[in-house]
Image: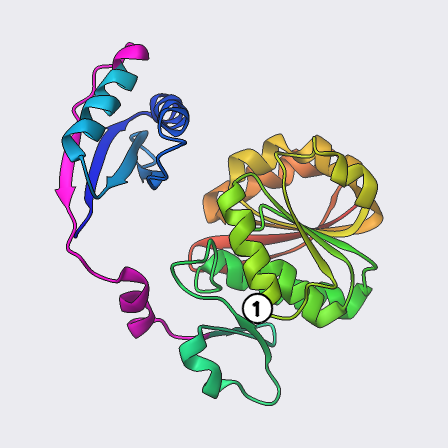
Amino acid sequence: MGQTRLYLTGSKAETDRIYAALDLAFEDDGLPLAVIEIDEDGDVHEVSLYAEEDVETVENRIRDVLAGLSLSRAVQREELPDIDWVAKSLEGLQPVRAGGFFVHGAHDRDRIEETDIPIEIEAGLAFGTGHHGTTAGCLETIARVVAEEKPANALDLGAGSAVLAIALAKLARIPVLATDIDPVATDVAEANVRLNGVGDFVETVTATGFDHPVFAGRGPFALVVANILAGPLMELAPAMARNVAPGGSLVLSGILDRQEDGVLAAYTAQGFRHIDTLHREGWVTIRMKR
């Protein structure tokens, strides 16, 4: 049976409210829920919920949620064919080499070369597979930082698939804390950590910001990698300064070219020093030191 995508649009503020309310309303149903940016300049965002059965009931529940928020939005439908999207995405997914790492799916294990540091991440399970410019930029920068500074410990903040945490563990063989605000992402990260044989080095934790007690127990960190988005990164700048060890390094990504100056300003105001910026596919990866 194919899925039906139920979706609606609004401003970021509106869709953030809608997403939070739908997440609460459907938390026991196990229905996939997502919010994406459609038009940054026009402040148009889209919330989607995917249902396979009782679509009418689900749509009515969405309308009830909107009514409770005093929002009037048209709920639209898109019928999705019954396709194994994970398998289909793997058909055209090419492995990526960046910074000496080889990020690949199971179907490309035979392409691993002797000089590669292999990281196996499956499309469809991943929140960051190495194929996005931000992740590849982080991998390249991580390789340079580890070679030059030999950090004693590290944090992958907003770990997603844990590809960066796995990279750090494989390359540096150091303790790595991998955190994400989404428990589903944390489960994916833990599975990938086990798959790549670095469970002795990487701890995965669901945590929002730096409020979780695990940061006090594991920090401060000689290296922090955060591939998130420019807005949250700027908000986190003061907390980053408290959690990066003196002389430690910071690798930031998820930042568009035009957002670089704003991020740099937020972190230099906290005493960080800009080392360099890697530009890739319209995105930047910024390296700084405390």
Residue closest to the eye, 154 or 197: 197
- Residue drawn at x 68%, y 67% is 198
The residue that label 1 is drawn on is 195
Relative to 273, is 54 on the left or the right? left
User: Compared to 220, does 130 lie above or below?
Assistant: below
Residue closest to the eye, 146 or 206: 206
Disc 1 is placed on an element classified as helix
Q: Is residue 236 visible?
A: yes
Task: Give how far across and how far down residue 79 sits, in percent.
Answer: 13, 46
Relative to 234, is 11 on the left or the right? left
- Residue drawn at x 27%, y 67% is 88
Q: Is residue 219 visible?
A: no
Looking at the rendering, which quadrant does residue 123 occupy? bottom left
The colour scheme used to paint the residues is: rainbow
Residue closest to the eye, 249 or 153: 153
| Residue, far bottom | 114
- Residue drawn at x 38%, y 74% is 94
Looking at the rendering, which quadrant does residue 262 occupy? top right
Task: Give how far across and how far down residue 250 sits, in percent.
Answer: 70, 50
| Residue 253 within the magenta-colored segment of the rendering | no
Relative to 163, is 90 on the left or the right? left
Task: Give how far across and how far down residue 239 sits, in percent.
Answer: 72, 33
Task: Give how far across and how far down residue 183 sits, in percent.
Answer: 53, 42
Residue closest to the eye, 226 or 163: 163
Q: In this picture, which residue range is highlighted in magenta?
A: 67-95
Relative to 125, is 45 on the left or the right? left
- Which image quadrant: the C terminus? top right
| Residue 81 within the magenta-colored segment of the rendering | yes
User: Compared to 224, does 102 lie above or below?
Assistant: below
Give amino acid for label 1.
Leu
